[in-house]
Each structure stands twice: as C-alpha cells, then as structure tokens.
Image: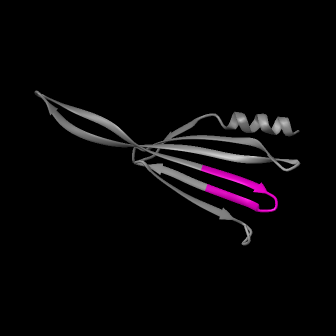
Amino acid sequence: AAVSRLQSHQLGGLEQTRTNADGTQVTTWQLEVPMRNAHDIVPLQVKVQREDKPDQDATEDRDDIEIKETREKLWKVDLAFDLEPLGPMQVHAQLLRGTLSSQLWAERPDS
C-alpha cells in the first residue's frame, strides 16, 4: 500500500503549468519523499513553484517596433512534515531578485 501511494504521488508530481489572467506563467512540481525519523519513516511533502511574470519593453529598431520579453522569476518552496517530538511543521521559502525569505510554522507551541 505504501509503495502504491508513493507511485501515485510521484505521478501526480509531474510538472503542471498554467498561465494566470495577468500573463504570469506558474509551473508547479509536487512530490512526497520518504524521510527517516529515528526508527520511523515519515513523508516529507515538497512543493516547488516557479512564477514567470512577463515584463514587456517596447524598443524601436529601425522602422520596426520590437517587443523584448523578459520574465522575472519568483521561486517558492513549501515543505510539510511531522517529526516527533516536534509535531507537524511547515516551511515556506521564496527567492525573488536574489533575496531569500522564509517562514516556519509549528503546530505545537513548544516546537
């Protein structure tokens, strides 16, 4: 049953891409990785997202107008796991323009 569940999650983790109304292209990868915690194997849920936001600059080149499209990339990583004795935890990190920020949530106050 565990192997079947792992295979199902891996198939669901294939790249998924969508384009939002504002032109932002969002690509998502999701997977579950088995992780050892003392004598147990616990799942580590991983979601990686890349957002490509279009930035169009119009520049004149001779008589033609050339539209140069560059994309600003925002990377996001979400982790979810349940490790004893800490309990359920989530981590969110994002990278934009060379700046990395992160947040950590713990269900138990003493974690």
Q: Quadrant of the C terminus?
A: bottom right
* Above-or-below relation of 79 to 85: above
Side of 81 where 68 appears, left or right: left
**Quadrant showing the N terminus:** top right
Instruction: Inspect the magenta stretch and tell me whether residue 39 lies in it.
Output: no
Query: In the visual, does 99 lie left or right of 13?
Result: left
Q: Is residue 74 left or right of residue 69?
A: right
Q: Position of residue 95 (x, y in %)?
A: 48, 49
Q: Residue at x 21, y 31 (%)?
A: 66
Tell me the magenta residue range: 78-91
Determine the image quadrant of residue 54.
Answer: top left
Where is residue 27? Give x, y as percent: 53, 40
Residue drawn 65% across and 63% down?
105
How many circles with numbers are drawn on the protein? 0
Front-most of residues 105 and 56 = 105
Outermost bottom residue = 109
> Residue 62, how many percent across, how many down?
11, 27
| Residue closer to the observer: 6 or 85 | 85
- Report x, y in % for residue 57: 24, 40
Q: For residue 85: magenta?
A: yes
* Residue 32 falls in image quadrant: top right
Is the image coloured rainbow, by chain, by secondary structure, or in one colour? one colour
Residue closest to the far front: 38
Main secondary structure found in the magenta portion: strand
